Amino acid sequence: MDSNLAESLIEALIFCSEEPLSENYLSIVLNKHGKFNVREILLKIKTTYDKRGINLVNIEKKWFFKTSLSIKDYLKIEHEKKRKLSKATMETLAIISYHQPVTRAEIEKVRGKPVFKGTLDILLNLKWIKPHERRETPGRPVTWVTDFEFLKHFGLSKISDLPKIDELESISFNKNLT
């Protein structure tokens, strides 16, 4: 193996690794194919990447690639968090979507169980529901309706595109037959 191939191998090993790699580990792998100065190769790779969008970094003799600090202000990385919604949250969302505008008390009446504040908070944070207006009844409770993100997430053009209740029942009934 020539020195260019040795350099490419080290670069690929570091790039593909989920964790920083030690110089000792890299020496063991590389020296199976000949005698190389791993430290010298690492410093050469580091120099190559010094003016790029990623840099080769050494901390406690462990090497890894990291986004260059010179461009950090231009990057905005968003992580999409996926989490499974509870049965109570899904029930609440279904009631709001089919009975909107609906108050918390009306949701509780349909569910037969209390709706905890956290349940509505989850749906609000997802932007699947929003407060609509206050009902002209004692206490003037807030009514809830679905929001744009709800339609977007479920692939609906408008709320009337939701399947009708009898369609859902027939789907559920047919599913149980198979």
Image (cartoon, helix red, strand yellow):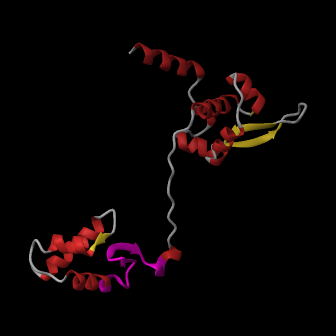
**Residue placed at 61% from the left, 38% from the top?**
158
Where is residue 176? Give x, y as percent: 44, 15
The image quarter in which residue 39 lies? bottom left
Where is residue 56? Give x, y as percent: 34, 78
Asked whether residue 63 is drawn in magenta, I would say: yes
Where is residue 129? Give x, y as percent: 67, 42
Which quarter of the figure is the C terminus placed in?
A: top left
Asked whether residue 45 is drawn in magenta, I would say: no
Q: Is residue 169 above or below residue 65?
A: above
Left or right: 72 in relation to 23: right
Left or right: 147 in relation to 178: right
Where is residue 75? Give x, y as percent: 50, 71
Q: Which residues are magenta?
A: 47-71
Left or right: 17 in relation to 101: left
The image quarter in which residue 86 lies? top right
The image quarter in which residue 46 lies? bottom left
| Of residues 12 and 106, the one drawn nearer to the viewer in this rendering | 12
